[in-house]
Image (cartoon, rainbow, N blue to C red):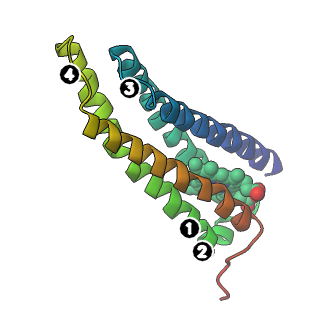
Amino acid sequence: METVDLLLAIFHHILVFSLAAVLAAEVVLIRNEMTHRTIGRLAGIDRAYGLVALFVIIIGVARVFYGLKGWEFYVYSWTFWAKMAAFAAVALLSIPPTISFLAWKKQAAADAAFAVPSAELASARGYLRAQMMIFMLIPIFAAAMARGYGQFGY
Ligand code: HEM
């Protein structure tokens, strides 16, 4: 149905822009000095990141099955799978920083003098930078996929 397709497309766009905004917020926040307030903010934003990502998956899968083109259009296309692989890579790269943010939050709550070890901070920054770079690939694959590039000739 055209209306369903349109609504799913609208939600998909809003969600993926929100996801990019949340990731950008984390990238900016982690450049700051890690005060306990900043750690709390990062942990809060990171929770939103997970939640928005979950909705991106739900709406994305719904687009595959309820979109106008039909699921066959996507599953026989390598650009679709490349987009999924890039999304999965970003998701995997988001795990170590999430673990760090939660550990820092816990330690900051228990110890007023807690300071984030610089090696842990550098590592979390690296993971966020890597996520940002791989994230850029997703809209590239999405645009190619939507136009039928990469479909297996069967
Ligand atoms: C951060 C993650 C994602 C980003 C940035 C993203 C981005 C985009 C963009 C920009 C489009 C529009 C392409 C165009 O019309 O030119 C699109 C379409 C689409 N996306 Fe995503 N997407 C993401 C995740 C997902 C996921 C997880 C799925 C499926 C499981 C998915 C399934 C689709 C489908 C089915 C379309 C419709 C393509 C068409 O019009 O034929 N997306 N996506």
Q: Secondary structure at mark 2?
A: helix
Drawn side of residue 17 relative to residue 122, left or right: right
Q: Nearer the viewer, residue 103 or 81?
A: 103
Q: Earlier in the sequence, mark 2 or mark 4?
A: 2
Report x, y in % for residue 9.
73, 46
What residue is drawn where x is 69% and y is 39%?
A: 11
Residue 61 seen from this side: no
Q: Which residue is mark 2?
A: 78
User: What's the CA distance linking mark 1 and mark 2?
Assistant: 6 Å
User: What's the CA distance linking mark 2 and mark 4?
Assistant: 44 Å
Ligand 1 located in image quadrant: bottom right
Q: Earlier in the sequence, mark 3 or mark 1?
A: 3
- At label 3, the amino acid type is Ala
Marks 3 and 4 in Cβ contact (< 8 Å) = no
Marks 1 and 2 in Cβ contact (< 8 Å) = yes
Q: Which residue is mark 3?
A: 43
User: Dividing the picture into quarters, in which one does residue 118 lie?
Assistant: top left
Q: Which residue is mark 1?
A: 82
- At label 1, the amino acid type is Ala
In the displayed structure, would residue 5 be above or below residue 29?
below
In the displayed structure, would residue 152 be above or below residue 138?
below
User: What's the CA distance linking mark 3 and mark 1?
Assistant: 30 Å
Q: Secondary structure at mark 4?
A: helix
**Rendered image: mark on residue 107:** 4
